[in-house]
Image (cartoon, rainbow, N blue to C red):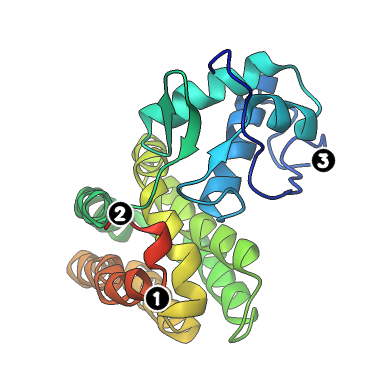
Amino acid sequence: MSSLEEPASEGIFVLDTLADGAPGARQATMGHRVFRAIKQAIVRGQLVPGHPISEAELARQLGVSRQPVREAFIKLSEMGLVEIRPQRGTFVQLISRREVENARFIREAIEVAVARRAAEVANGESVRPLFALVEEQDACGDRPDQGRFLALDDALHRAIALLADCEHAWRVVEDLKVQMDRVRFLAISDATPVDTIVAQHRDMVTAIARNDPDAAADAVRTHMREILNSLPVVAASNRDVFVP
């Protein structure tokens, strides 16, 4: 940050990712927990694209020193989520359609390969948790809590990667998909029907359960390309948060 007076962060947000009870919180370092909290706030739109964010204010809200927030800003800048402008401050990046489309292209290639392997090794016991996650998503209803619904979404994709013994592939996807996540958080309310997502997930899991790699790959491709349908709609209705 510059020596100039820092702009106030846009809005007040409440995050539970620093709490000891949060999943994985005890294992994570404080720096990682701060990074994860700020990243989540950006993905969820609690820190508004195009607006300044204050190192001092975020440190105060999170109850930490400024050092882990400063380190988080550097990581978030590398991910394309914030822009650090010398002598001006740090700003949340607008969403780039091009970056979203590039991330989707790479993610599809990885997840298709993972689904194929999962279909090759799946059995009745290993797919049971996958079906359970799909049903849990379905039970969220037509207007679900966005955070919970997308957490279940991620849990399903991670579970498929674990079934395929491809946990590292999921870690790559997790970093890659952050720009997609920003659109996904908008798309649930603006463009993509929840029942469409649930149906696509059910198709993926059913193909894996049937040990059909080709069908699993096709189901993942269909699912990964859904964002190409919703992205223009979301961008048109949220012009202020997208790169012109």
Judging by the rendered image, the residue that carries numbered circle 3 is: 21
Residue type marked 1: Ser
At mark 3, the secondary structure is loop
* Label 3 vs label 1, nearer the camera: 1
- Splitting the image into 4 quarters, where does residue 137 fall? bottom right
The answer to which of 231 and 177 lies nearer the viewer is 231
Is 101 on the left or on the right of 72, as rendered? left
x 58%, y 12%: residue: 3
Upstream in the sequence, badge 2 or badge 1? 1
Residue type marked 2: Val
Q: Residues within 10 Å of mark 2 (few under 14, many from 20)?
A: some
x 76%, y 44%: residue: 16
At mark 1, the secondary structure is helix
Judging by the rendered image, the residue that carries numbered circle 1 is: 237
Number of numbered discs overlaid on the protein picture: 3
Distance between mark 3 and mark 1 Cα atoms:
37 Å
Where's residue 195, x and y in %? 47, 86
Where's residue 222, x and y in %? 24, 73
Split into 4 quadrants, where in the image is the N terminus? top right
Q: Residues within 10 Å of mark 3 (few under 14, many from 20)?
A: few
Split into 4 quadrants, where in the image is the C terminus? bottom left
- Splitting the image into 4 quarters, where does residue 214 fall? bottom left
Residue type marked 3: Gly
Upstream in the sequence, badge 3 or badge 1? 3
